[in-house]
């Protein structure tokens, strides 16, 4: 369900089921939300040395700097996760887990002020031979808090809560002191970018455009080929961790509607089924494939443009339109074939099915008749099948991903639903890069997008509710800002008590529904068609892919 960018909601507290062994040629339909991880686990001894994993992308991203506005897409994430360091990973149950490839330890060493001490692995080194040290942490903190003039950075991801980053007992010890309580600190510095990038505005803004100059992962970049639409990674000879089993990972642009055929042509080794019943049927009848499933931190949503001058700038108009959208009907239409029991998402902040999840969408329930009455009251008069205010028709541009059949289904359903209340929806399918531009410039009325959240959901949500300043939107692409949401979300991220933090966040989410900031649709069931011989790869659930462990069975 990766239609664009942004941030997310998914299912966290699920019952663990057995993983498929990859033996069947005609895989059965998986049950909805069944299990946490399904990756065909094998030991290194069971895998052959070498081989190439061919990985489909929607497009080659403009930037590989994930903290720069042009680098926030999931396409960037999939590539950079193989080559950039992180402090914590995510366990199958959704909790943060220390990444011991990069850190020896990370401990809360003082409560007041809150202080965290990181100990970096002695061998951890950037691809240019520079050791990873406390200075990389300091530089990232400064870059993401606006302390480096000229850097166009996505901020507000918890770095603003830090008071200082200092050297500990040596260069490999990092002492981070917070100005206020920040209980989700495990989400910081993942990924970590080098000081050489974060201290130089030119490198930060443009040095990662269509290239990755510095890495520190099990793989390194061999080539970014814009003409061939590929990104090629090879083993990193400087890597200090377990030697990767694969020789190479090649990311290749494949249009969504061509994924099954690309696999049949032996061009890729897996593809996401997402919400597509057609892809599921193709996978079920393709020999040598297995269907792997584990609900992910993903959702599809409608981003609403409510910025100054936008058609939906009036919150009352946004509420009327939202009341005319039946999200459960969209969920059933789109995902019902692959997840028959799936429900619409009712929370903007917490993963569905987690103990912190509450469905707050009752604040803005679907009611087509009431939506029509609201539009009447706002002066949008219905003439025939359409509504007008004076000579101006009520017409909304819906930006989707070109060539994406799932997006086409959602667009058709939205057109039908809103037509019932006299609102015209004009779909505007755009290819990946053009869609990114439309999103970053708020050139849409509604935009169908996907995203994912980290194991620190409140901190990772803050860029979505950032106060836009000119072209600096962080991740608030619809330009809808509410001071109370910003303040209360900040309070929630500083609350040390888990229960109280969830209570504050629940009130924030209700307010988000009230202002119609965005409309979450449904969680990603995490279904993939994967070659049976591929091990330690498939449906990662809430975890990240372990690139060094991927391989092919002997």
Image: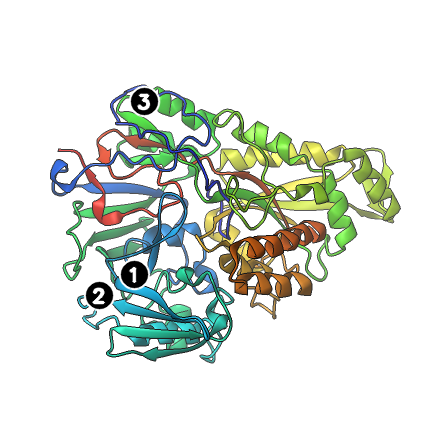
Q: Which of these two is toward me, 161 or 422?
A: 161
Q: Residue at x 56, y 57 (%)?
A: 501
Classify mark 1: residues with Cα within 10 Å, few (<14), some (14-19) or many (20+): many
Q: Is residue 443 visible?
A: no
Q: Which of these two is toward me, 137 or 418?
A: 137
The residue labelled by disc 2 is 121
The residue labelled by disc 1 is 85
Tell which circle, 1 or 2, labels the residue nearer the N-terminal end. 1
Mark-to-mark CA distance, 1 and 3: 37 Å
Q: Position of residue 250 (x, y in %)?
A: 26, 46
Q: Residue at x 58, y 28 (%)?
A: 332
Element on which disc 3 rests: loop
Q: Position of residue 319 (x, y in %)?
A: 75, 47
Q: Are marks 3 and 2 in contact (CB under 8 Å)?
A: no
Q: Which of these two is toward me, 207 or 533?
A: 533
Q: Position of residue 274 (x, y in %)?
A: 45, 34
148 to 65, vertically: above or below:
below
Mark nearest the camera among 1 and 2 is 2
Mark-to-mark CA distance, 3 and 2: 44 Å
Q: Residue at x 69, y 56 (%)?
A: 306
């Amino acid at each position: 369900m990766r239609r664009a960018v942004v941030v997310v909601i998914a299912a966290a507290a699920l019952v663990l089921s057995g993983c498929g062994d990859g033996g069947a040629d005609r895989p059965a339909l998986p049950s909805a939300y069944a299990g946490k991880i399904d990756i065909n686990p094998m030991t290194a001894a069971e895998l052959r040395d070498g081989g190439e994993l061919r990985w489909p992308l929607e497009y080659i991203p403009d930037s590989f700097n994930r903290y720069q506005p042009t680098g926030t897409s999931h396409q960037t994430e999939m590539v950079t996760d193989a080559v950039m360091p992180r402090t914590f990973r995510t366990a199958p149950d959704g909790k943060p887990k220390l990444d011991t490839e990069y850190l020896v330890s990370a401990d809360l060493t003082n409560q007041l002020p809150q202080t965290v001490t990181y100990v970096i692995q002695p061998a951890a080194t950037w691809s240019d031979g520079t050791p990873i040290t406390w200075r990389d942490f300091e530089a990232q903190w400064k870059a993401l808090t606006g302390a480096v003039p000229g850097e166009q950075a996505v901020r507000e991801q918890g770095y603003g809560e830090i008071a200082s980053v200092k050297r500990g007992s040596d260069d490999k010890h990092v002492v981070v002191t917070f100005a206020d309580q920040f209980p989700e600190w495990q989400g910081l510095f993942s990924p970590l970018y080098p000081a050489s990038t974060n201290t130089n505005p030119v490198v930060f803004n443009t040095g990662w455009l269509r290239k990755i100059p510095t890495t520190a992962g099990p793989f390194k970049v061999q080539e970014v080929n814009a003409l061939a639409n590929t990104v090629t990674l090879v083993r990193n000879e400087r890597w200090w961790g377990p030697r990767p089993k694969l020789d190479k990972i090649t990311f290749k642009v494949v249009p969504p509607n061509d994924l099954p055929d690309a696999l049949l042509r032996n061009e890729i080794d897996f593809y996401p089924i997402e919400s597509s019943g057609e892809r599921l049927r193709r996978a079920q009848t393709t020999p040598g494939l297995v269907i792997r499933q584990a609900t992910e931190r993903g959702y599809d949503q409608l981003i609403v443009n409510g910025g100054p001058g936008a058609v939906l700038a009036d919150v009352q108009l946004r509420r009327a339109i939202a009341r005319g959208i039946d999200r459960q009907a969209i969920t059933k239409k789109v995902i019902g074939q692959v997840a028959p029991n799936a429900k619409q998402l009712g929370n903007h902040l917490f993963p569905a099915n987690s103990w912190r999840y509450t469905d707050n969408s009752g604040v803005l329930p679907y009611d087509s008749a009431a939506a029509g009455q609201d539009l009447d009251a706002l002066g949008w008069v219905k003439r025939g099948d359409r509504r007008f205010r004076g000579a101006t028709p009520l017409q909304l541009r819906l930006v989707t991903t070109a060539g994406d059949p799932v997006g086409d289904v959602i667009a058709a359903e939205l057109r039908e639903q809103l037509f019932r209340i006299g609102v015209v929806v004009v779909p505007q399918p755009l290819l990946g890069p053009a869609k990114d531009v439309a999103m970053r410039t708020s050139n849409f009325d509604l935009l169908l997008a996907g995203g994912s959240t980290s194991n620190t959901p409140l901190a990772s949500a803050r860029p979505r509710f950032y106060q836009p300043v000119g072209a600096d939107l962080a991740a608030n692409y619809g330009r809808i800002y509410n001071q109370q949401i910003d303040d209360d979300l900040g309070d929630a991220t500083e609350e040390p008590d888990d229960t109280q933090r969830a209570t504050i966040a629940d009130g924030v989410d209700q307010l988000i529904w009230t202002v119609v900031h965005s409309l979450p649709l449904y969680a990603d069931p995490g279904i993939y068609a994967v070659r049976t011989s591929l091990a330690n790869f498939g449906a990662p659930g809430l975890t990240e892919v372990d690139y060094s462990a991927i391989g092919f069975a002997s």
